Image: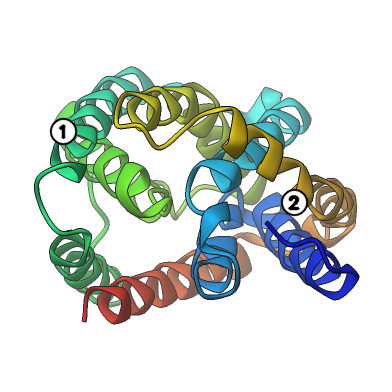
Amino acid sequence: MPTEPLGIALCILISFIAAAIHGVIGIGFNFVCAPLLLFLYPQLVPAPIIINSVIIVCLVAWVNREDVQFRQLGWLVGACAVGAFAAGFALTRVSESTYATLFGSLLLFAVVVSLLGWRPPLTAWSASIAGVIGGFMGTITSVGGPPVALLYQRLPGPALRGTLSAYFLITSPIILIALSAAGRLGWEEVKLSVVLMPGMLLGFACSKFLAGHLNQQATRAMVLTLCTAGGIVLLVRGW
């Protein structure tokens, strides 16, 4: 746990940037925090980050509550639970690097296909696939949002933020339960999560101003950029 002032300030800065991005597009807190903190303070990954993400998704979901798209959300949540508990089982048996490489490759492939113009239909089948992959990735790496974000990438900004936040609001506790069952979440992780909270709250406050200046094309570009970076990070971790 960071105890020196510089280390605490750095953690707050990272969570501030992550929360500002998350507040604008509805995804990004875990992704920005996880790779940086993994190298600086690995004890903050994944449970303390996910605890903070539960708070920010509550805030973003509340602000954008009138724009939530409930279509197929139930399929996403149910599939995420399956993926999360499968990951909890796999954590004790298979190398994380193997899964990081696999999902990083799949994520980059999905981004390329999206850039070529393919728009995945929003069906129970596509939602289930995105949910399973997102739940599995989120439990193992704390970066589980990109598959779902790709599914909803063409929604307007408020609808994108609200829908993703509603999904994360329901599924983050599922992932925390899976981590607890795997012995990766306890009172120590709860105490560690406090280090990130000041930056997270400040970043969310700033994001409300930034979100008002971005149109649908800009938010979609941010989603695709973040997903691309996420795929690269997962590949690097796997290698």
The image quarter in which residue 169 lies: top right
- Quadrant where the C terminus lies? bottom left
Pinpoint residue 4: horizontal percent, then vertical percent: 84, 68
For residue 215, which numbered disc appears in the image?
none
Report helix, strand or loop for mark 1: helix
Contact? badges 2 and 1 (CB < 8 Å): no
Mark 1 = which residue? 89
Q: Is residue 190 left or right of residue 39?
A: right
Which residue shows up at 51% across the image and 62% down it?
A: 42
Q: Is residue 210 left or right of residue 100?
A: right
Pinpoint residue 28: horizontal percent, then vertical percent: 57, 58
- Quadrant where the N terminus lies? bottom right
Which residue shows up at 34% across the image and 79% down it?
A: 232
Q: Is residue 54 left or right of residue 84?
A: right
Image vertical order of residue 43 relative to residue 224, above or below: above
The image quarter in which residue 193 lies: top right
Q: Residue type at mark 2?
A: Leu
The image quarter in which residue 72 lies: top left
For residue 196, which numbered disc appears in the image?
2
In this orientation, does residue 162 appear?
Answer: no
Classify mark 2: residues with Cα within 10 Å, few (<14), some (14-19) or many (20+). many
